Image (cartoon, helix red, strand yellow):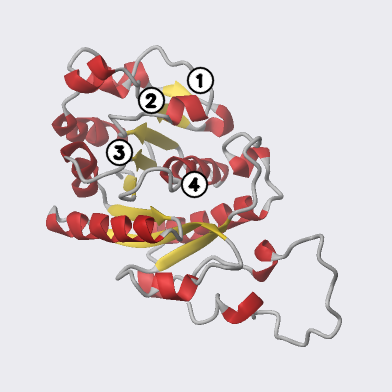
Amino acid sequence: MAGYVCTVAGGKGGVGKTTTAVNVAAAIEEEGYDTVVVDADLGMANLAAMLEVEPETSVHQILGGGRAVSDALTDVQGGITIVPGEQSLEAFADADPAKLKTVIKTLRNAYDVVLIDTGAGLSHETTVPLGLADGVLLVTTPDDVAVGDAIKTAELAERVDGNVVGTVLNRTTTETDVEAIAGRFDSKLFAVIPDEIEATVEEPLVLNAPDSPAAEAYHQLTDRLLGLFFEGVEIDEIETAVEPEWFVDENEEDDDDDDDDDGDFSHGIFQGI
């Protein structure tokens, strides 16, 4: 049986697409599924740098016609395999995004899950992965521009017969109006990822900061994705991954007079999603 291909996309740069792909990949591997992450951000490839590896072969060389897919397979921590990119302008100029179709076909026959990490913007190279996937996972931050660009990405995916399965809201705080943001998307909000990890923590968080709220959020997101990928769970049956304790400041004193239900969230901003 061929593997499931999931494209991780979002119109704006810096919203956490690569972070999401890496953490979901690590969590999926922990569940026993062979997973590969492809760096399809051909203009600004950063997957290898994030994972602190220096691969000998890149996806750019495959797309340029000089190397085989197997040449670029690189093992990283957590049992994840990646197909990294490179950052030179020469490599970008030589890479043909149309050849991604052959690359992904090869990988889906060898892995249980193929995650495609995409770049920012609405260019040809960011559009191709939207139409190749079984499902597209949108990633955005609460920033209004990021939300708007993610919505544009969803519209573009629809035009190329892509299937947007859900959305991830990254870098969320107690000040974020999650319900309002979720209401702007046609797709289901799969997970709310808290903004609480220091920049010094190495990726993937699910391996290097496993007790953090963000790691727990990624684990819950992964549970929902695996249900969708392999267990026949319908999107309408998926509940948003979000927990009150992810947004509690440990330095705050407990409020003994707080008689709210355990499922309620600070300021009520998480209710109704």
Query: For the residue marked with disc 1, what is the amino acid?
Result: Val
Distance Cα–Cα, label 2 vs label 3: 16 Å
Which residue in the protein does label 3 denote?
108
- Quadrant of the rendered image containing residue 193: bottom right
In the rendered image, residue 8, in percent from the top left (x then y), is placed at: 36, 47
Residue 231 can be seen, yes or no: yes
Q: Residue at x 14, y 33 (%)?
A: 98
- Of the two numbered discs 3 and 1 in the rendering, the one whose residue sits closer to the viewer: 1
* Residue behind mark 4: 24
Tell me if 266 is positioned left or right of 110 in this view. Answer: right
- CA separation, marks 2 and 1? 9 Å
Q: Are marks 4 and 1 in contact (CB under 8 Å)?
A: no
Q: Residue at x 58, y 68 (%)?
A: 175
Can residue 265 be seen at all in this image of the molecule? no
Q: Which mark, residue 246? A: none
Q: Which residue is mark 1?
A: 53
Residue 224 lies, in percent from the top left, at 47, 61
The kind of residue tagged 4 is Val
What amino acid is labelled 3 in the image? Arg
Give the residue at mark 2.
84
